[in-house]
Image (cartoon, rainbow, N blue to C red):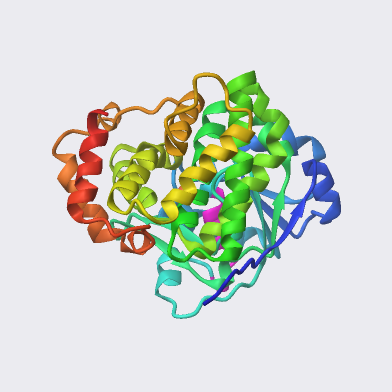
């Protein structure tokens, strides 16, 4: 059994300018980013490198059409190193750009073996995906009508670089949804049958950093997050290492159907099912690691200076109350979901998400999953 794999070297810098100097960023480099990240932080450095702004090729999640157009522009420029600076979309696209013979997404998906021909550096600008340390890229293949993950050891970054400066311009909503996503990565990998003593250390450290940060926000207000930027970034990275090895599970599996149909952002869609899945686990298999998790969550929040009114009847209850302070959880119907979606989402989850369902703490039946969707519809 593999205990732990961390493929990229992990580096950190306080600022983008220090990173650019440290890695001699110049004419051979392509930076894939968004203009709203470039303007406040990168523009003033006047670097001699190439920039591509992803939004020029479409909004939202990465599609085959978007990636093919970016590949065409990149191939007309020529570069030896790709530097991804952004959230999940930017990172997923960059993992494809560095592959040998990358001209067209469809060709890469059909290729038996993928090789890397460019260096890849990934700088996350949210505190959630953990994608800087994983080797999967999820592309919406619009020409095939499906969303598919492409995975290869060639898609690991050479360097994952953590720069807290990028978090200083992150809007509160993106901070909240992305850090909740990271917390869910930590919890799902902690409970996964694939959890090892090594991945558990990363899961636990991520939970500690995020929940203690949340306690501070609950006491001092939303701006308190800026004091802990470095800590959130590290936590997201730890959680990425944990789930990259031990896997995510039912929360992620269930969130895809809602996210895909009603365009609910990934972290918010996961949040929808987070504590209700934990309660379902507790009900189905009360004796087991869920007990340790419940105690751990309560302890961390207590040590973090549990704010008034947050303490619940147990650790999971306290977590739910604390999360409610960070971001309001809406019922599924608030995103447009209707009763007919409940059986359809359950069907889609069971049919398409076995990759994630196999990491469940306890096996959930289709009826269990359907009842979780039903409870979320108005609750
Ligand atoms: Fe996630």
Residue 316 sits inside the magenta stretch: no
Which quarter of the picture shows residue 341?
top left
Q: Is residue 161 above or below residue 218?
A: below
* Whole-percent x, y for residue 197 in the image: 58, 64
Magenta part of the protein: which range? Answer: 90-101
| Furthest residue toward bottom | 112
Residue at the image point whose x is 69% and y is 36% from the top = 229
Is residue 76 in sight in this rendering?
yes
Q: Nearer the viewer, residue 116 or 123?
A: 123
The answer to whether residue 193 is left or right of residue 95 is left
Residue at the image point whose x is 42% and y is 25% from the top = 328
* Whole-percent x, y for residue 230 in the image: 72, 40
Which quarter of the picture shows residue 358?
bottom left
Q: Is residue 136 above or below residue 378?
A: below
The answer to whether residue 247 is left or right of residue 153 is left
Residue at the image point whose x is 45% and y is 27% from the top = 321
Residue 92 sits inside the magenta stretch: yes
Q: Is residue 167 above or below residue 52?
A: above
């Amino acid at each position: 059994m593999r205990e732990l794999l961390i493929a990229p070297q992990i580096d950190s810098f306080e600022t983008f300018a220090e990173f650019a100097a440290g890695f001699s960023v110049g004419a051979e480099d392509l930076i894939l980013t968004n203009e709203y990240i470039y303007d406040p932080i990168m523009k003033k450095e006047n670097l001699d490198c190439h920039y591509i702004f992803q939004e020029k090729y479409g909004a939202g999640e990465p599609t085959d059409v978007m990636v093919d157009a970016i590949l065409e522009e990149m191939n007309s420029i020529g570069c030896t190193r790709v530097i991804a600076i952004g959230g999940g979309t930017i990172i997923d696209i960059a993992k494809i750009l560095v592959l040998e013979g990358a001209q067209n997404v469809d060709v890469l998906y059909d290729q038996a073996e993928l090789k890397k021909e460019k260096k890849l550096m990934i700088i996350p600008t949210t505190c959630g995906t953990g994608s800087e340390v994983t080797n999967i890229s999820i592309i919406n293949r619009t020409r095939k009508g499906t969303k598919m993950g492409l995975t290869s050891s060639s898609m690991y970054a050479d360097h994952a670089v953590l720069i807290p400066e990028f978090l200083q311009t992150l809007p509160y909503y993106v901070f909240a949804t992305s850090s909740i996503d990271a917390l869910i990565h930590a919890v799902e990998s902690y409970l996964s049958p694939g959890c090892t003593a090594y991945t558990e250390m990363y899961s636990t450290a991520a939970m500690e950093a995020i929940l203690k940060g949340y306690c501070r926000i609950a006491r001092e207000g939303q701006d308190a997050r800026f004091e802990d930027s470095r800590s959130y970034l590290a936590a997201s990275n730890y959680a990425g290492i944990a789930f990259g090895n031990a896997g995510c599970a039912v929360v992620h599996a269930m969130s895809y159907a809602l996210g895909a149909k009603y365009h609910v952002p990934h972290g918010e869609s996961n949040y929808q099912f987070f504590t209700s899945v934990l309660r379902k686990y507790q009900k189905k298999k009360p004796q087991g690691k869920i007990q340790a998790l419940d105690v751990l969550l309560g302890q961390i929040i207590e040590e973090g200076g549990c704010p008034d009114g947050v303490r619940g009847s147990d650790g999971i209850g306290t977590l739910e109350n604390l999360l409610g302070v960070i971001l309001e959880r809406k019922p599924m119907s608030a995103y447009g979901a209707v009763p007919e979606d409940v059986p359809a989402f359950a069907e889609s989850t069971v049919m398409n998400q076995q990759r994630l369902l196999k990491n469940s703490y306890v096996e959930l039946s289709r009826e269990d999953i359907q009842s979780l969707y039903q409870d979320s519809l108005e609750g």
